[in-house]
Image (cartoon, helix red, strand yellow):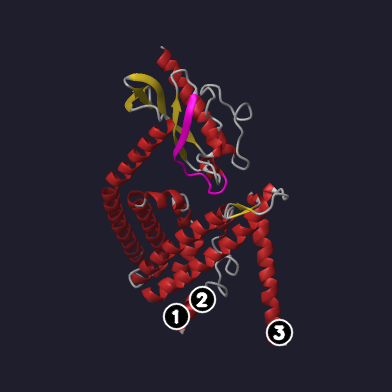
């Protein structure tokens, strides 16, 4: 009995130290990580809507977006889209023009299986952008579906569907809000 | 002499993948292309070396009966710190290796080495042992993924092998992993067994 308490205390002590070390590391790295994420977002914005010279952040019913402006004229939106993939959330940035046609899709973060689901973000040799995401460009964001106008990646049906469905859902909801 | 044998044993005699059958879960999942195999191998080697040194340093404090939860806490903490630091200071490396890092926590090679070696040896020897095991894991992953990538995708390291070969896709899906590892282990056991026969007759 006495031994059990002693072992429990030692284990608790080790966990306590681990917690402190983790909290410390988290505090130190937090601002840096947030800065990296912001930088990646900016890079994604510029890649999706290269014509825009200013991005104005906004929010509509839980959808975070940026208005892409060129000499204070609205030329498109960039929406933050989150899909539920095979290994966790897939965070994306989707660019649309004011009528809802997709200008570009960028994956910001994902945790899909390396070699299968990770192909949603794979760039083939000689290409400049991921082949899976390229097929979204030029299609209406509110009428996307696997097998209808989007080809899923073999062996990564769940990841492909997660990306497609999330874009379709978020863009449809967003367009309805903007029209009103 | 002894330290070099600690390094070399992980490459063949006690190879974690082919001889000890440890860490097969990430091996099956990740060995779809050589780049992935290499990435996982390097990341795992790093974590293995770090956690082995820490476990070895605290081996006299940890009571035997609660050692496994202690090791898990140490390994998980170490992996999380690496992940946070990589995200903050090496975003490019984090993008390339990031998705393998959480997989390493569940890699039983790391716990296996902590339990079988680092808890009984000094930090320096543990680090050498961990490096050897990591390299053994890395080359095993590279071999398996080279076979699977060549047969399943028709490429090696992304370069095409032949235009006249249409690759059977199942080789880069789960069945291909099981087949490849099974055949490789059968071949290795066959040759090892023959060697042993010669020694005894």
Of A94 and A169, the residue lying toward us? A94
Secondary structure beneath dot 3 equals helix
> Which residue is disc 2 drawn over?
B8
Q: Is residue B188 above or below residue A43?
A: below
**In terms of image quadrants, where is residue B157?**
bottom right
Callout 2 environment at 10 Å: few (<14), some (14 to 19), or many (20+)? Answer: some
The region drawn magenta spans A102-116
Contact (Cβ within 8 Å) of mark 3 with mark 2: no
Q: Where does residue A152 sit, x and y in percent of width and height?
A: 60, 35
Image quadrant where one finds the C terminus of chain B: bottom right
Of A69 and B82, the residue lying toward us? A69
Q: Is residue A106 magenta?
A: yes
Same chain, labels 1 and 3: yes
Q: CA distance from mark 2 to mark 1?
A: 9 Å
Q: Is residue B48 above or below residue A63?
A: below
State left or right for residue B93 relative to residue B178.
left
Mark nearer the N terminus (2 vs 1): 1
> Which residue is disc 3 drawn over?
B198
Q: Residue at x 63, y 41 (%)?
A: A154
């Amino acid at each position: 009995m006495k031994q059990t308490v002693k072992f429990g205390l030692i284990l608790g002590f080790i966990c306590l130290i681990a917690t402190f070390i983790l909290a410390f590391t988290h505090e130190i790295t937090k601002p840096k990580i947030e800065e990296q994420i912001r930088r990646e977002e900016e890079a994604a914005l510029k890649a999706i809507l290269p014509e825009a010279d200013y991005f104005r952040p906004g929010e509509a019913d839980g959808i975070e977006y940026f208005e892409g402006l060129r000499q204070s004229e609205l030329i498109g939106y960039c929406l933050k889209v989150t899909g539920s993939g095979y290994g966790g959330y897939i965070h994306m940035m989707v660019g649309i023009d004011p009528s809802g046609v997709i200008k570009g899709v960028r994956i910001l973060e994902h945790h899909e299986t390396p070699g299968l689901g990770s192909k949603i973000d794979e760039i083939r040799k000689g290409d400049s952008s991921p082949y899976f995401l390229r097929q979204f460009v030029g299609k209406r964001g509110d009428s996307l579906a696997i097998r209808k106008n989007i080809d899923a990646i073999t062996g990564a049906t769940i990841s492909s569907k997660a990306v497609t469905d999330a874009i379709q859902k978020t863009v449809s909801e967003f367009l309805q809000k903007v029209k009103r | 002499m002894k330290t070099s044998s600690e390094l070399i044993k992980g490459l063949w005699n006690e190879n974690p993948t082919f001889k000890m059958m440890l860490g097969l879960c990430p091996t099956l999942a990740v060995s779809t292309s050589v780049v992935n195999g290499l990435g996982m191998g390097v990341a795992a080697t790093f974590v293995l070396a770090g956690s082995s040194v820490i476990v070895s340093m605290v081996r006299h404090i940890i009571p035997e009966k609660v050692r496994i939860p202690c090791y898990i806490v140490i390994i998980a903490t170490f992996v999380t710190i690496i992940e946070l630091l990589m995200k903050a200071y090496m975003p490019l490396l984090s993008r390339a290796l990031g998705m393998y890092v959480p997989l390493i926590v569940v890699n039983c090679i790391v716990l296996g080495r902590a339990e079988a070696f680092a808890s009984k040896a000094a930090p320096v020897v543990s680090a050498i042992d961990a490096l050897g095991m990591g390299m053994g894991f890395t080359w095993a992953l590279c071999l398996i993924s080279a076979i699977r990538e060549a047969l399943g995708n028709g490429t090696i390291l992304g370069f095409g092998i032949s235009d006249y070969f249409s690759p059977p896709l199942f080789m880069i899906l789960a069945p291909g992993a099981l087949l490849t590892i099974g055949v490789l282990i059968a071949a290795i056991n066959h040759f090892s067994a023959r060697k042993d026969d010669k020694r005894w007759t």
